[in-house]
Image (cartoon, coloured by chain):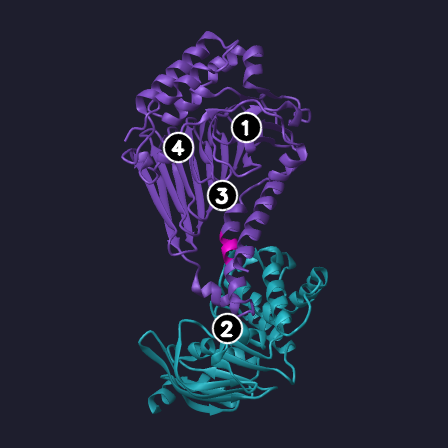
Chain colours: A cyan, B purple
């Protein structure tokens, strides 16, 4: 589904990703771990098409197509979804309107008709139960005045409604208490299917107790320094990152 | 350059002043004398530094003649609001009884034309007209005071809370071309009353005319007044409007000024917080394009202690448009515990649009909290990316974010029909521009 080949990327003059290769197949869950500043959030944002990063070499193919050649909205229309580490507040646009616009644009790009607004309301109300959010929040401005936890739930709600093929969760666990973490994780797990894939970017192993990865990759200094199965996350929890960072 | 204003002497002499009491004739003459003495302001005048009124000064506008009324359907189609609200309609500056509907006003709310009120309550008019909006060194207020032929007087009795707002509609049609319109509004909200008033300035046909409006609003102790100004004049027209408010103890004044019309507009909203614990909220939205110029000046005078003022203005400018926001706050030495906050945010959609923002705080009390903030910018790249990352195309994302910028301040309009109408205008304006 996703093939990252020796990708290099910089922000301004600073090179952050220094040759990352990674293959993600349908049905898989990959965890990207690493210390602060290792480049793991940059990797997530480069896949989604963040304008703040410039890819200097390497390639990313998605479903066989050149992902880097696509605008961010085209990537989303083809099923890429990034749950932001810091979701953006959009005062003045309601959650419901925002979601319906996104949903319809994705449908339009895939040759489908706009959804009936009432049918869409039913869909949202069904999906909102997954993340245990108050339905009244659908009619509030996107993320405006939301608590940190509410913003993260709202990201997962968007994911639930848009049903991406490739979901990337960027530090979705940061700022969540244990109850919220459980809710968010069960929401993500409920969306898991054989034909989609998930990349979980996290600093801590904690989230991986709930969203169990098939593969764990450790990033340090802009490179993957170690890959392994889910037991690698436990090892990191016990030993920290230093032994890998030093070895790199 | 002080533009010649003597050209208006003949028009003044030709005014029909039949039945006007002596004091009013004196007031008008004094106003004309002041107008002649000060002339139109130039950009050397600090209050007009960013706004040149040369296009107004160099033209010679005529007094409007009475003309046949447009249809009610045309009037309502041109305005935003609930058609069931009681309304007073002025066509080319003159009150039009056949289009007005004042029967649904509740008990305790008296609305009459200036001419009628001069007949039935001459002492009231004498006691209040020109008392808040004084014309000393104020050319446009002097101009209005000298020439105001028709106007509206609104009185809300003690403790009366009106259900529906009064919609004052100033409509210009094709016959307004070349004319000057000097509407005058006098509002007296007696203690503990609550009232809403919407002043709409609209045109039925693009034409060049000059609206020079003055409103005086007295808000008694514990009374609340909501004032909405909707300026959607012809884009060839000129508009200067002053709203002068005096607030008593524990009173509230909520103002919203929407400015999207006129080639050149200047709106002054001034409130004097003369009684303790009064509250004032001045919000506004200006949306201009092409070569339009929209200027707002607010002035909050904190005279009494424990008063609060809040201001939020937003501007969206495209083309070569020029926006100005000048927010003045004065805190008297007596006005301790003043709590003032002012923000002005402008969004530039083109590289040639421009905005000048000037907060002006004069604080003479030592135990006060006054803040101001001002931003001028473009759409946030990260917010655009966030929308695109959800599949929303670049153009739609820009349109939606531009609308959102406007909607954030439109949300503060408390009248549902007005808010929804303005949101619809803003939404269509930006989504259609972008497509």
Residue B189 visible (yes or no): no
Which element carries disc 1, helix, strand or loop? Answer: loop
Q: Chain of mark 4?
A: B
Work out whether residue A148 or residue A1 is closer to the camera in this orientation and state it. A1
Q: Residue under circle 3?
A: B260
Asked if the residues shown at circle 4 and circle 2 are in contact, with their CB atoms under 8 angstroms apart, the answer is: no
The answer to whether residue B34 is above or below residue A15 is above
Q: CA distance from mark 4 to mark 3?
A: 18 Å
Task: Determine whether label 1 and label 4 are within 8 Å by CB.
Answer: no
The residue at 38%/51% (across/down) is: B375
Residue located 61% across and 82% down the image: A196
Report the magenta residues as a range. B401-405
Image quarter of the C terminus of chain B: bottom right
- On screen, residue A96 versus residue A86, left or right, reads right
Q: Which element type, helix, strand or loop, lies under badge 3?
A: loop
Circle 4: element type: helix
Disc 4 packing (10 Å; few <14; some 14–19; many ≥20): some
Cα separation, mark 2 vs mark 1, equals 52 Å
Mark 3 vs 1, N-terminal side: 1
In the rendering, at what x and y percent does residue B169 appear? 58, 31
Q: Position of residue B141 (x, y in %)?
A: 41, 25
Q: Nearer the viewer, residue B60 or B289?
A: B60
Instruction: Identify the secondary structure beneath mark 2.
Output: helix
Q: Which mark is residue B92?
A: 1
Q: Position of residue B98 (x, y in %)?
A: 66, 24
Could you say which disc has been placed on residue A72 in the image? Answer: 2
Q: Earlier in the sequence, mark 1 or mark 4?
A: 4
Between marks 2 and 1 in the image, the one whose residue lies nearer the viewer: 1
Q: Position of residue A242 (x, y in %)?
A: 36, 85
Q: Residues within 10 Å of mark 3 (few under 14, many from 20)?
A: many
- Say if labels 1 and 4 share a chain: yes
């Amino acid at each position: 589904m996703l093939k990252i080949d020796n990708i290099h990327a910089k922000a301004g003059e600073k090179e952050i990703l220094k040759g990352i290769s990674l293959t993600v197949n349908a049905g898989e869950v990959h965890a990207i771990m690493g210390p602060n500043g290792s480049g793991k959030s940059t990797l997530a944002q480069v896949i989604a098409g963040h304008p703040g990063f410039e890819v200097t070499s390497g390639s990313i193919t998605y479903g066989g197509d050149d992902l880097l050649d696509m605008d961010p909205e085209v990537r989303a229309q083809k099923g890429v979804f990034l749950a932001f580490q810091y979701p953006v507040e959009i005062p003045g646009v309601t959650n419901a309107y925002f979601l319906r616009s996104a949903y319809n644009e994705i449908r339009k790009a895939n040759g489908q008709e706009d959804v009936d607004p009432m049918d869409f309301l039913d869909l949202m109300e069904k999906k909102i139960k997954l993340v245990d959010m108050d339905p009244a929040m659908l009619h509030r401005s996107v993320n405006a005045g939301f608590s940190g936890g509410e913003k993260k739930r709202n990201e997962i709600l968007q994911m639930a409604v848009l049903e991406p093929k490739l979901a990337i969760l960027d530090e979705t666990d940061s700022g969540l208490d244990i109850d919220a973490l459980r809710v968010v994780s069960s929401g993500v797990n409920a969306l898991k299917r054989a034909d989609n894939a998930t990349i979980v970017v996290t600093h801590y192993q904690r989230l991986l107790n709930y969203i169990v990865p098939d593969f764990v990759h450790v990033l340090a200094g802009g490179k993957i320094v170690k890959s392994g199965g889910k037991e690698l996350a436990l090892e990191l929890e016990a030993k920290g990152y230093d032994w890998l960072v030093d070895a790199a | 350059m002080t533009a010649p204003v003597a050209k208006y002497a003949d028009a003044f002499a030709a005014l029909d002043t039949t039945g006007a009491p002596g004091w009013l004739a004196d007031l008008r003459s004094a106003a004309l004398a002041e107008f002649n003495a000060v002339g139109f302001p130039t950009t050397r005048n600090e209050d007009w530094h960013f706004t040149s009124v040369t296009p107004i000064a160099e033209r010679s506008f005529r007094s409007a003649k009475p003309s046949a009324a447009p249809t009610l359907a045309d009037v309502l189609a041109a305005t935003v609001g609930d058609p069931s609200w009681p309304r007073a309609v002025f066509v080319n500056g003159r009150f039009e009884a056949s289009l007005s509907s004042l029967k649904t006003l509740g008990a305790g709310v008296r609305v009459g034309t200036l001419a009628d009120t001069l007949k039935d309550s001459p002492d009231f008019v004498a006691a209040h007209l020109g008392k808040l909006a004084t014309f000393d060194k104020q050319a446009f207020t002097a101009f209005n005071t000298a020439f105001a032929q028709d106007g509206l007087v609104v009185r809300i009795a003690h403790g009366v809370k009106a259900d529906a707002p009064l919609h004052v509609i100033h409509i210009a049609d094709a016959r307004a071309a070349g004319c000057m319109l000097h509407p005058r509004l006098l509002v007296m909200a007696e203690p503990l009353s609550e009232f809403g008033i919407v002043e709409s300035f609209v045109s039925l046909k693009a034409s060049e005319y000059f609206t020079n409006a003055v409103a005086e609003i007295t808000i008694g102790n514990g009374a609340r007044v909501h004032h909405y100004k909707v300026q959607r004049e012809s884009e060839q027209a000129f508009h200067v409007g002053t709203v002068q408010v005096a607030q008593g103890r524990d009173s509230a004044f909520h103002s919203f000024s929407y400015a999207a019309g006129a080639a050149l507009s200047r709106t002054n909203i001034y409130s004097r917080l003369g009684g303790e614990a009064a509250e004032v909220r001045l919000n506004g939205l200006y949306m201009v394009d092409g070569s339009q110029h929209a200027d707002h000046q607010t002035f909050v005078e904190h005279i009494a202690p424990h008063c609060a003022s809040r201001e939020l203005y937003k501007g969206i400018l495209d083309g070569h448009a020029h926006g100005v926001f000048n927010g003045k706050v004065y805190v008297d030495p007596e006005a301790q515990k003043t709590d003032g906050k002012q923000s002005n945010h402008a969004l530039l959609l083109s590289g040639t649009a421009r905005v000048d923002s000037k907060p002006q705080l004069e604080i003479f009390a030592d135990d006060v909290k006054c803040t101001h903030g001002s931003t001028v910018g473009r759409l946030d790249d990260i917010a655009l990316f966030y929308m695109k990352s959800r599949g929303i195309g670049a153009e739609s994302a820009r349109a939606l974010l531009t609308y959102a910028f406007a909607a954030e301040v439109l949300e503060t309009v408390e009248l549902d029909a007005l808010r929804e109408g303005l949101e619809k205008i803003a939404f269509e304006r930006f989504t259609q521009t972008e497509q």
